[in-house]
Image (tube, rainbow, N blue to C red):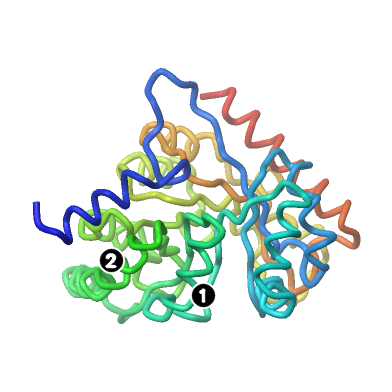
């Protein structure tokens, strides 16, 4: 075993919780995570106490335009943020950083390491218009380009999770399958977003069930009526599990098949970005718990 392989192995072994395989003798469960983006630009001092109310100790910090909580952290300083997390008994579980891009995550790695953050989420790069063998070649090129970045992440105890975002090379089932096959680095994985795929429960469930240990994060979000135009709030909320028509039971069955222990984030996008999904902090938390209750009912149907 050469030094690089050993370091990758050691880093993967040291990772706690979210990207570790579940023990087969333990019942399957979802490990929830609170998305700061659901609260828009509400202060972190107000958002952090909500984590425990949805049954988690972990938060996902988002920057603009979806929220401004990463900017709030920068403004208050890491030491103050550390004290604020400790005050409310919350841990930094995920840093979402689309705007840095998959090749620009380096500055966040020391921050993640300081707080024991195990996952950084980003988008992919490549020619998204490619199809067939050309798309596979794009995915292969991307996974090769990501290796040094995944090496750096491994050195900080972090896994880079790439979302299957629309308009990118992982936006189709084929793109996702090829990524799972070609992303062999133990610190490069997938953030699975049902919202960006065909809204067919069986298709998504079967897809998830074939991805093995390459799923590090699961968005509890469906497409509903979309999120890129102004519409009544009740239509926006159709993105939430249990609100829109997508049956999440087959998806959770797929997650169970692969012994998924990563974070599950009940989620939606408001329009415009950067505002809370409800008119009050308590209302946002209630909405998240509504979806969490739905997902728990789906678990009982497995």
> Does residue 131 show up?
no
Which is more toward the observer, 69 or 248?
69
**Left or right for 95, reference 237:** left
Q: Which residue is mark 2?
A: 151
Residue at figure coordinates x 63%, y 49% from the top left: 58
**Left or right for 131, reference 17:** left
Which is more foreground, mark 2 or mark 1? 2
Which is more toward the observer, 52 or 135?
52
Residue at figure coordinates x 56%, y 36% from the top left: 30
Residue at figure coordinates x 63%, y 51% from the top left: 91
Determine the image quadrant of residue 149.
bottom left
Q: Residue furthest top?
A: 25
Vertical side of 241 occupied by 156: above or below: below
C-alpha gap between disc 2 and disc 1:
19 Å
Say whether disc 2 or disc 1 marks the residue closer to the N-terminus: 1
* Residue 4 screen position, x and y as percent: 17, 61
Secondary structure found at label 1: loop
Residue at figure coordinates x 20%, y 69% from the top left: 140
Q: Which residue is mark 1?
A: 98
Determine the image quadrant of residue 132.
bottom left
């Amino acid at each position: 075993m050469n030094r690089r392989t050993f370091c990758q192995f050691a880093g993967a072994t040291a990772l706690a919780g979210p990207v570790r395989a579940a023990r087969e003798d333990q019942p399957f469960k979802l490990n929830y995570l609170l998305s700061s983006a659901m609260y828009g630009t509400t202060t972190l001092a107000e958002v952090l106490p909500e984590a425990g109310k949805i049954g988690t100790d972990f938060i996902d910090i988002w920057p603009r335009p979806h929220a401004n909580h990463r900017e709030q952290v920068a403004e208050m300083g890491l030491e103050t943020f550390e004290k604020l997390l400790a005050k409310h008994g919350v841990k930094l579980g995920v840093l979402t950083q689309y705007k840095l891009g998959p090749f620009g995550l380096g500055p966040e790695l020391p921050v993640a390491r300081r707080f024991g953050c195990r996952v950084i989420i980003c988008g992919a790069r490549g020619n998204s218009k490619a199809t067939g063998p050309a798309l596979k070649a794009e995915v292969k090129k991307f996974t090769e380009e990501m290796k040094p970045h995944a090496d750096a992440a491994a050195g900080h105890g972090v896994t880079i999770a790439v979302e299957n975002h629309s308009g990118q090379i992982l936006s189709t089932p084929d793109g996702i399958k090829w990524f799972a096959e070609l992303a062999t680095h133990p610190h490069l994985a997938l953030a699975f977003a049902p919202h960006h795929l065909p809204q067919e429960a069986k298709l998504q469930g079967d897809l998830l069930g074939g991805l093995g240990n390459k799923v590090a994060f699961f968005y509890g979000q469906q497409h509903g009526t979309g999120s890129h135009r102004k519409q009544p709030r009740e239509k926006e909320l159709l993105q939430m599990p249990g609100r829109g028509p997508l049956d999440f039971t087959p998806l959770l069955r797929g997650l169970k098949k692969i012994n998924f222990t990563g974070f599950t984030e009940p989620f939606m996008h408001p329009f415009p970005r950067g505002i809370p999904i409800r008119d009050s902090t308590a209302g946002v938390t209630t909405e998240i718990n509504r979806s969490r209750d739905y997902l728990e009912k789906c678990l009982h149907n497995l």
